[in-house]
Image: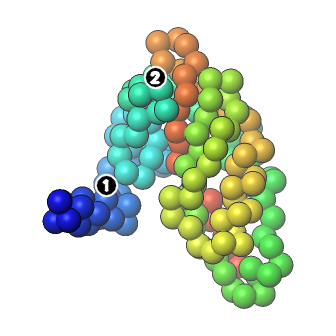
């Protein structure tokens, strides 16, 4: 049993550290065919209601600019020279609201907290499956750069 856990952990770590077949569309990460996959760093992710494929991905209303307009670079992070790309997984409900967020790959507690708070505030167009809004997950990359 311990051996299986170690192997699964290594496989999972490999997927997170070296994502395959991921394309960036409208600033959101999509795996495989954009119109038939739920976005994510570890491949096809199931939404909370166990649906696997969505016809239309959730997108922030106003695009990625809606997220970046609300972001601020904390002074303490600037002073410490903290920068990098944060990947956050947002759980979008049928109404386009964000139910919760998880950091997939963070940079620091300071920047991760800012990103989570901002993503929670943004309204999304809901994911659509067969013409009906459904819960879905979307991975969002957000980069902090001191230059």
Rendered residue at 56%/67% (across/down): 106
| Quadrant that contains the C terminus | bottom right
Q: Secondary structure at mark 1?
A: loop
Disc 1 residue crowd, few under 14, some 14–19, many 20+, Cα 10 Å: some
**Measured from the top left, where is residue 82 in percent x and y?**
66, 81
Which badge, 2 or 1, is on the more N-terminal residue?
1
Of residues 10 and 76, which is closer to you in this image?
Answer: 10
Q: Label 2: which residue?
A: 55
The answer to whether one can see residue 85 in this image is yes
Q: What residue sits 55% from the left and 49% below the top?
A: 89
Residue receiving disc 1: 20
In this rendering, the answer to whether 5 lies above or below 140 is below
Residue 38, position as x, y percentages in the image: 44, 36
> Seen from this angle, which residue lies furthest bottom?
80
Q: Which mark is residue 73?
A: none
Marks 2 and 1, how far apart in space? Answer: 21 Å
Pick out the residue farthest to the front. 1
**What residue is at 53 percent from the left and 42 percent from the top?**
138
SS for tag 2?
loop
**Number of numbered callouts drawn:** 2
Residue at position x 45%, y 46% in the image: 40
Taking the image as shown, residue 60 lies to the left or right of residue 102, namely right
Q: Quadrant of residue 132?
A: top right
Q: Position of residue 17 (x, y in %)?
A: 37, 66
Quadrant of the rendering where the N terminus is positioned: bottom left
Q: Is residue 77 above or below residue 41?
A: below
């Amino acid at each position: 049993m311990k051996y299986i856990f170690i192997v699964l952990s290594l496989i999972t770590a490999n997927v997170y550290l070296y994502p395959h077949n991921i394309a960036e569309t409208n600033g959101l990460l999509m795996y495989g065919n954009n119109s038939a996959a739920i976005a994510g760093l570890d491949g096809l992710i199931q939404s909370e209601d166990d649906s696997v494929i969505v016809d239309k991905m959730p997108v922030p209303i106003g695009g990625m600019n809606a997220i970046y307009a609300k972001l601020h670079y904390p002074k303490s992070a600037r002073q410490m020279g903290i920068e990098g790309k944060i990947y956050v997984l947002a759980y979008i409900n049928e109404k386009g609201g964000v139910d919760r967020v998880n950091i997939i790959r963070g940079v620091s507690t300071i920047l991760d907290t800012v990103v989570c708070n901002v993503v929670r505030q943004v309204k999304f167009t809901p994911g659509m499956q067969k013409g009906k809004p459904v819960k879905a997950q979307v991975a969002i990359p957000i980069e902090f750069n001191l230059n």
